[in-house]
Image (tube, rainbow, N blue to C red):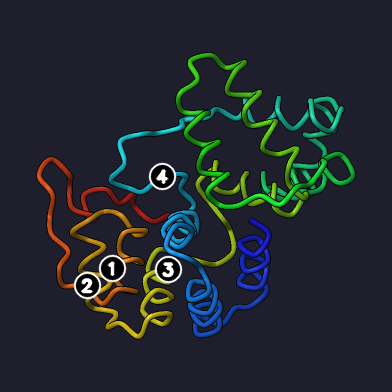
């Protein structure tokens, strides 16, 4: 998770599309086959791939309660931080400073927690699972969990740039990456196919909509 957050900060710090693509490509190229698809999905600000029918649908209250409990602050303090930043991720980073107990945490660990949160049926259990994850992270890492959960990284990175980063990482034609992404609805799977030279083997799955059918209108 540390390298994911570090890469996110580097991407956020530049306005150059080419530099963002380069940073993504270099990062993706370093990852193993288990981590690569997770990183690709998380850089689209989603906990699960588009085609995945699981949705966390975490309300703000769950995130708020997990952060307030961990940092031992009240809602007013959280609100004041939000007034300064207007970004849930930045609020989490500020409020949790000095209040977590960081341990090395992989993107797989993050995924497992997302699954656990999904499987819980009560707000209390969901909050506890999220709190436990945040407690294991540095404030900067926790910031990116907040960004993923709210569906907006706010680092100047759109899905098209993630596709370009994949193409850059594995020397694949961007058109093939984009086509495979449209067919599969899973940018993580596409990243693995690109690494293995198998983008043209991507096939449309029955009962899974095309990527353009899944997309939300840009604001």
Residue 139, percent across and down? 77, 49
The residue that label 4 is drawn on is 48
The residue that label 3 is drawn on is 162
The kind of secondary structure element at disc 3 is: helix
Which residue: 74% across, 54% down? Answer: 140
Q: Earlier in the sequence, mark 4 or mark 3?
A: 4
Q: Earlier in the sequence, mark 2 or mark 3?
A: 3
Instruction: Tell me whether the residue at label 3 lies in contact with that at label 1, contact meaning CB atoms closer than 8 angstroms.
Output: no
Give the label, 3 or 1, closer to the camera.
1
Q: Residues within 10 Å of mark 2 (few under 14, many from 20)?
A: some
The residue that label 1 is drawn on is 193
Q: Earlier in the sequence, mark 2 or mark 1?
A: 1
Q: Earlier in the sequence, mark 4 or mark 2?
A: 4
Count of residue discs: 4
The residue that label 2 is drawn on is 198
Task: Calculate the distance from the C-alpha at mark 2 to the C-alpha at mark 3.
Answer: 18 Å
* In front of the other: 215 or 22: 22
Give the label, 4 or 3, closer to the camera.
4
Residue 127, disc: none
The residue lying furthest to the right in this view is: 98
Residue 111, percent across and down? 51, 43
The kind of secondary structure element at disc 4 is: loop
Q: Quadrant of the N terminus?
A: bottom right
Instruction: Tell me whether the residue at label 4 lies in contact with that at label 3, contact meaning CB atoms closer than 8 angstroms.
Output: no
Residue 81, percent across and down? 80, 42
The correct choice, above or below, for 81 with respect to 184 in the image is above
Which residue: 52% across, 29% down? Answer: 58
The residue lying furthest to the left in this view is: 206
């Amino acid at each position: 998770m540390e390298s994911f957050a570090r890469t996110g900060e580097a991407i956020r710090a530049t306005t150059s599309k080419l530099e963002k693509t380069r940073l993504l490509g270099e990062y993706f190229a370093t990852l193993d086959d288990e981590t690569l698809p997770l990183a690709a999905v998380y850089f689209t600000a989603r906990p699960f791939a588009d085609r995945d029918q699981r949705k966390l649908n975490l309300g703000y209250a769950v995130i708020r309660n997990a952060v307030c409990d961990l940092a031992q602050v009240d809602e007013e303090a959280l609100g004041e931080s939000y007034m300064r930043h207007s970004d849930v991720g930045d609020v989490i980073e500020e409020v949790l400073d000095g209040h977590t107990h960081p341990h090395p945490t992989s993107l797989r660990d993050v995924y497992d927690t997302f699954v656990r949160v999904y499987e819980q049926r009560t707000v209390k259990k969901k909050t506890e699972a999220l709190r436990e994850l945040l407690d294991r992270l540095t404030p900067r890492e926790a910031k990116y969990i907040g960004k993923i959960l709210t569906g907006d990284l706010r680092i100047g990175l759109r899905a098209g740039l993630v596709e370009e980063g994949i193409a850059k990482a594995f020397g694949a034609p961007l058109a093939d990456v984009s086509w495979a992404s449209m067919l599969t609805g899973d940018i993580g799977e596409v990243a693995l196919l690109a690494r293995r030279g198998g983008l043209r083997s991507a096939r449309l799955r029955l009962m899974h909509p095309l990527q353009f059918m899944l997309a939300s209108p840009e604001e």
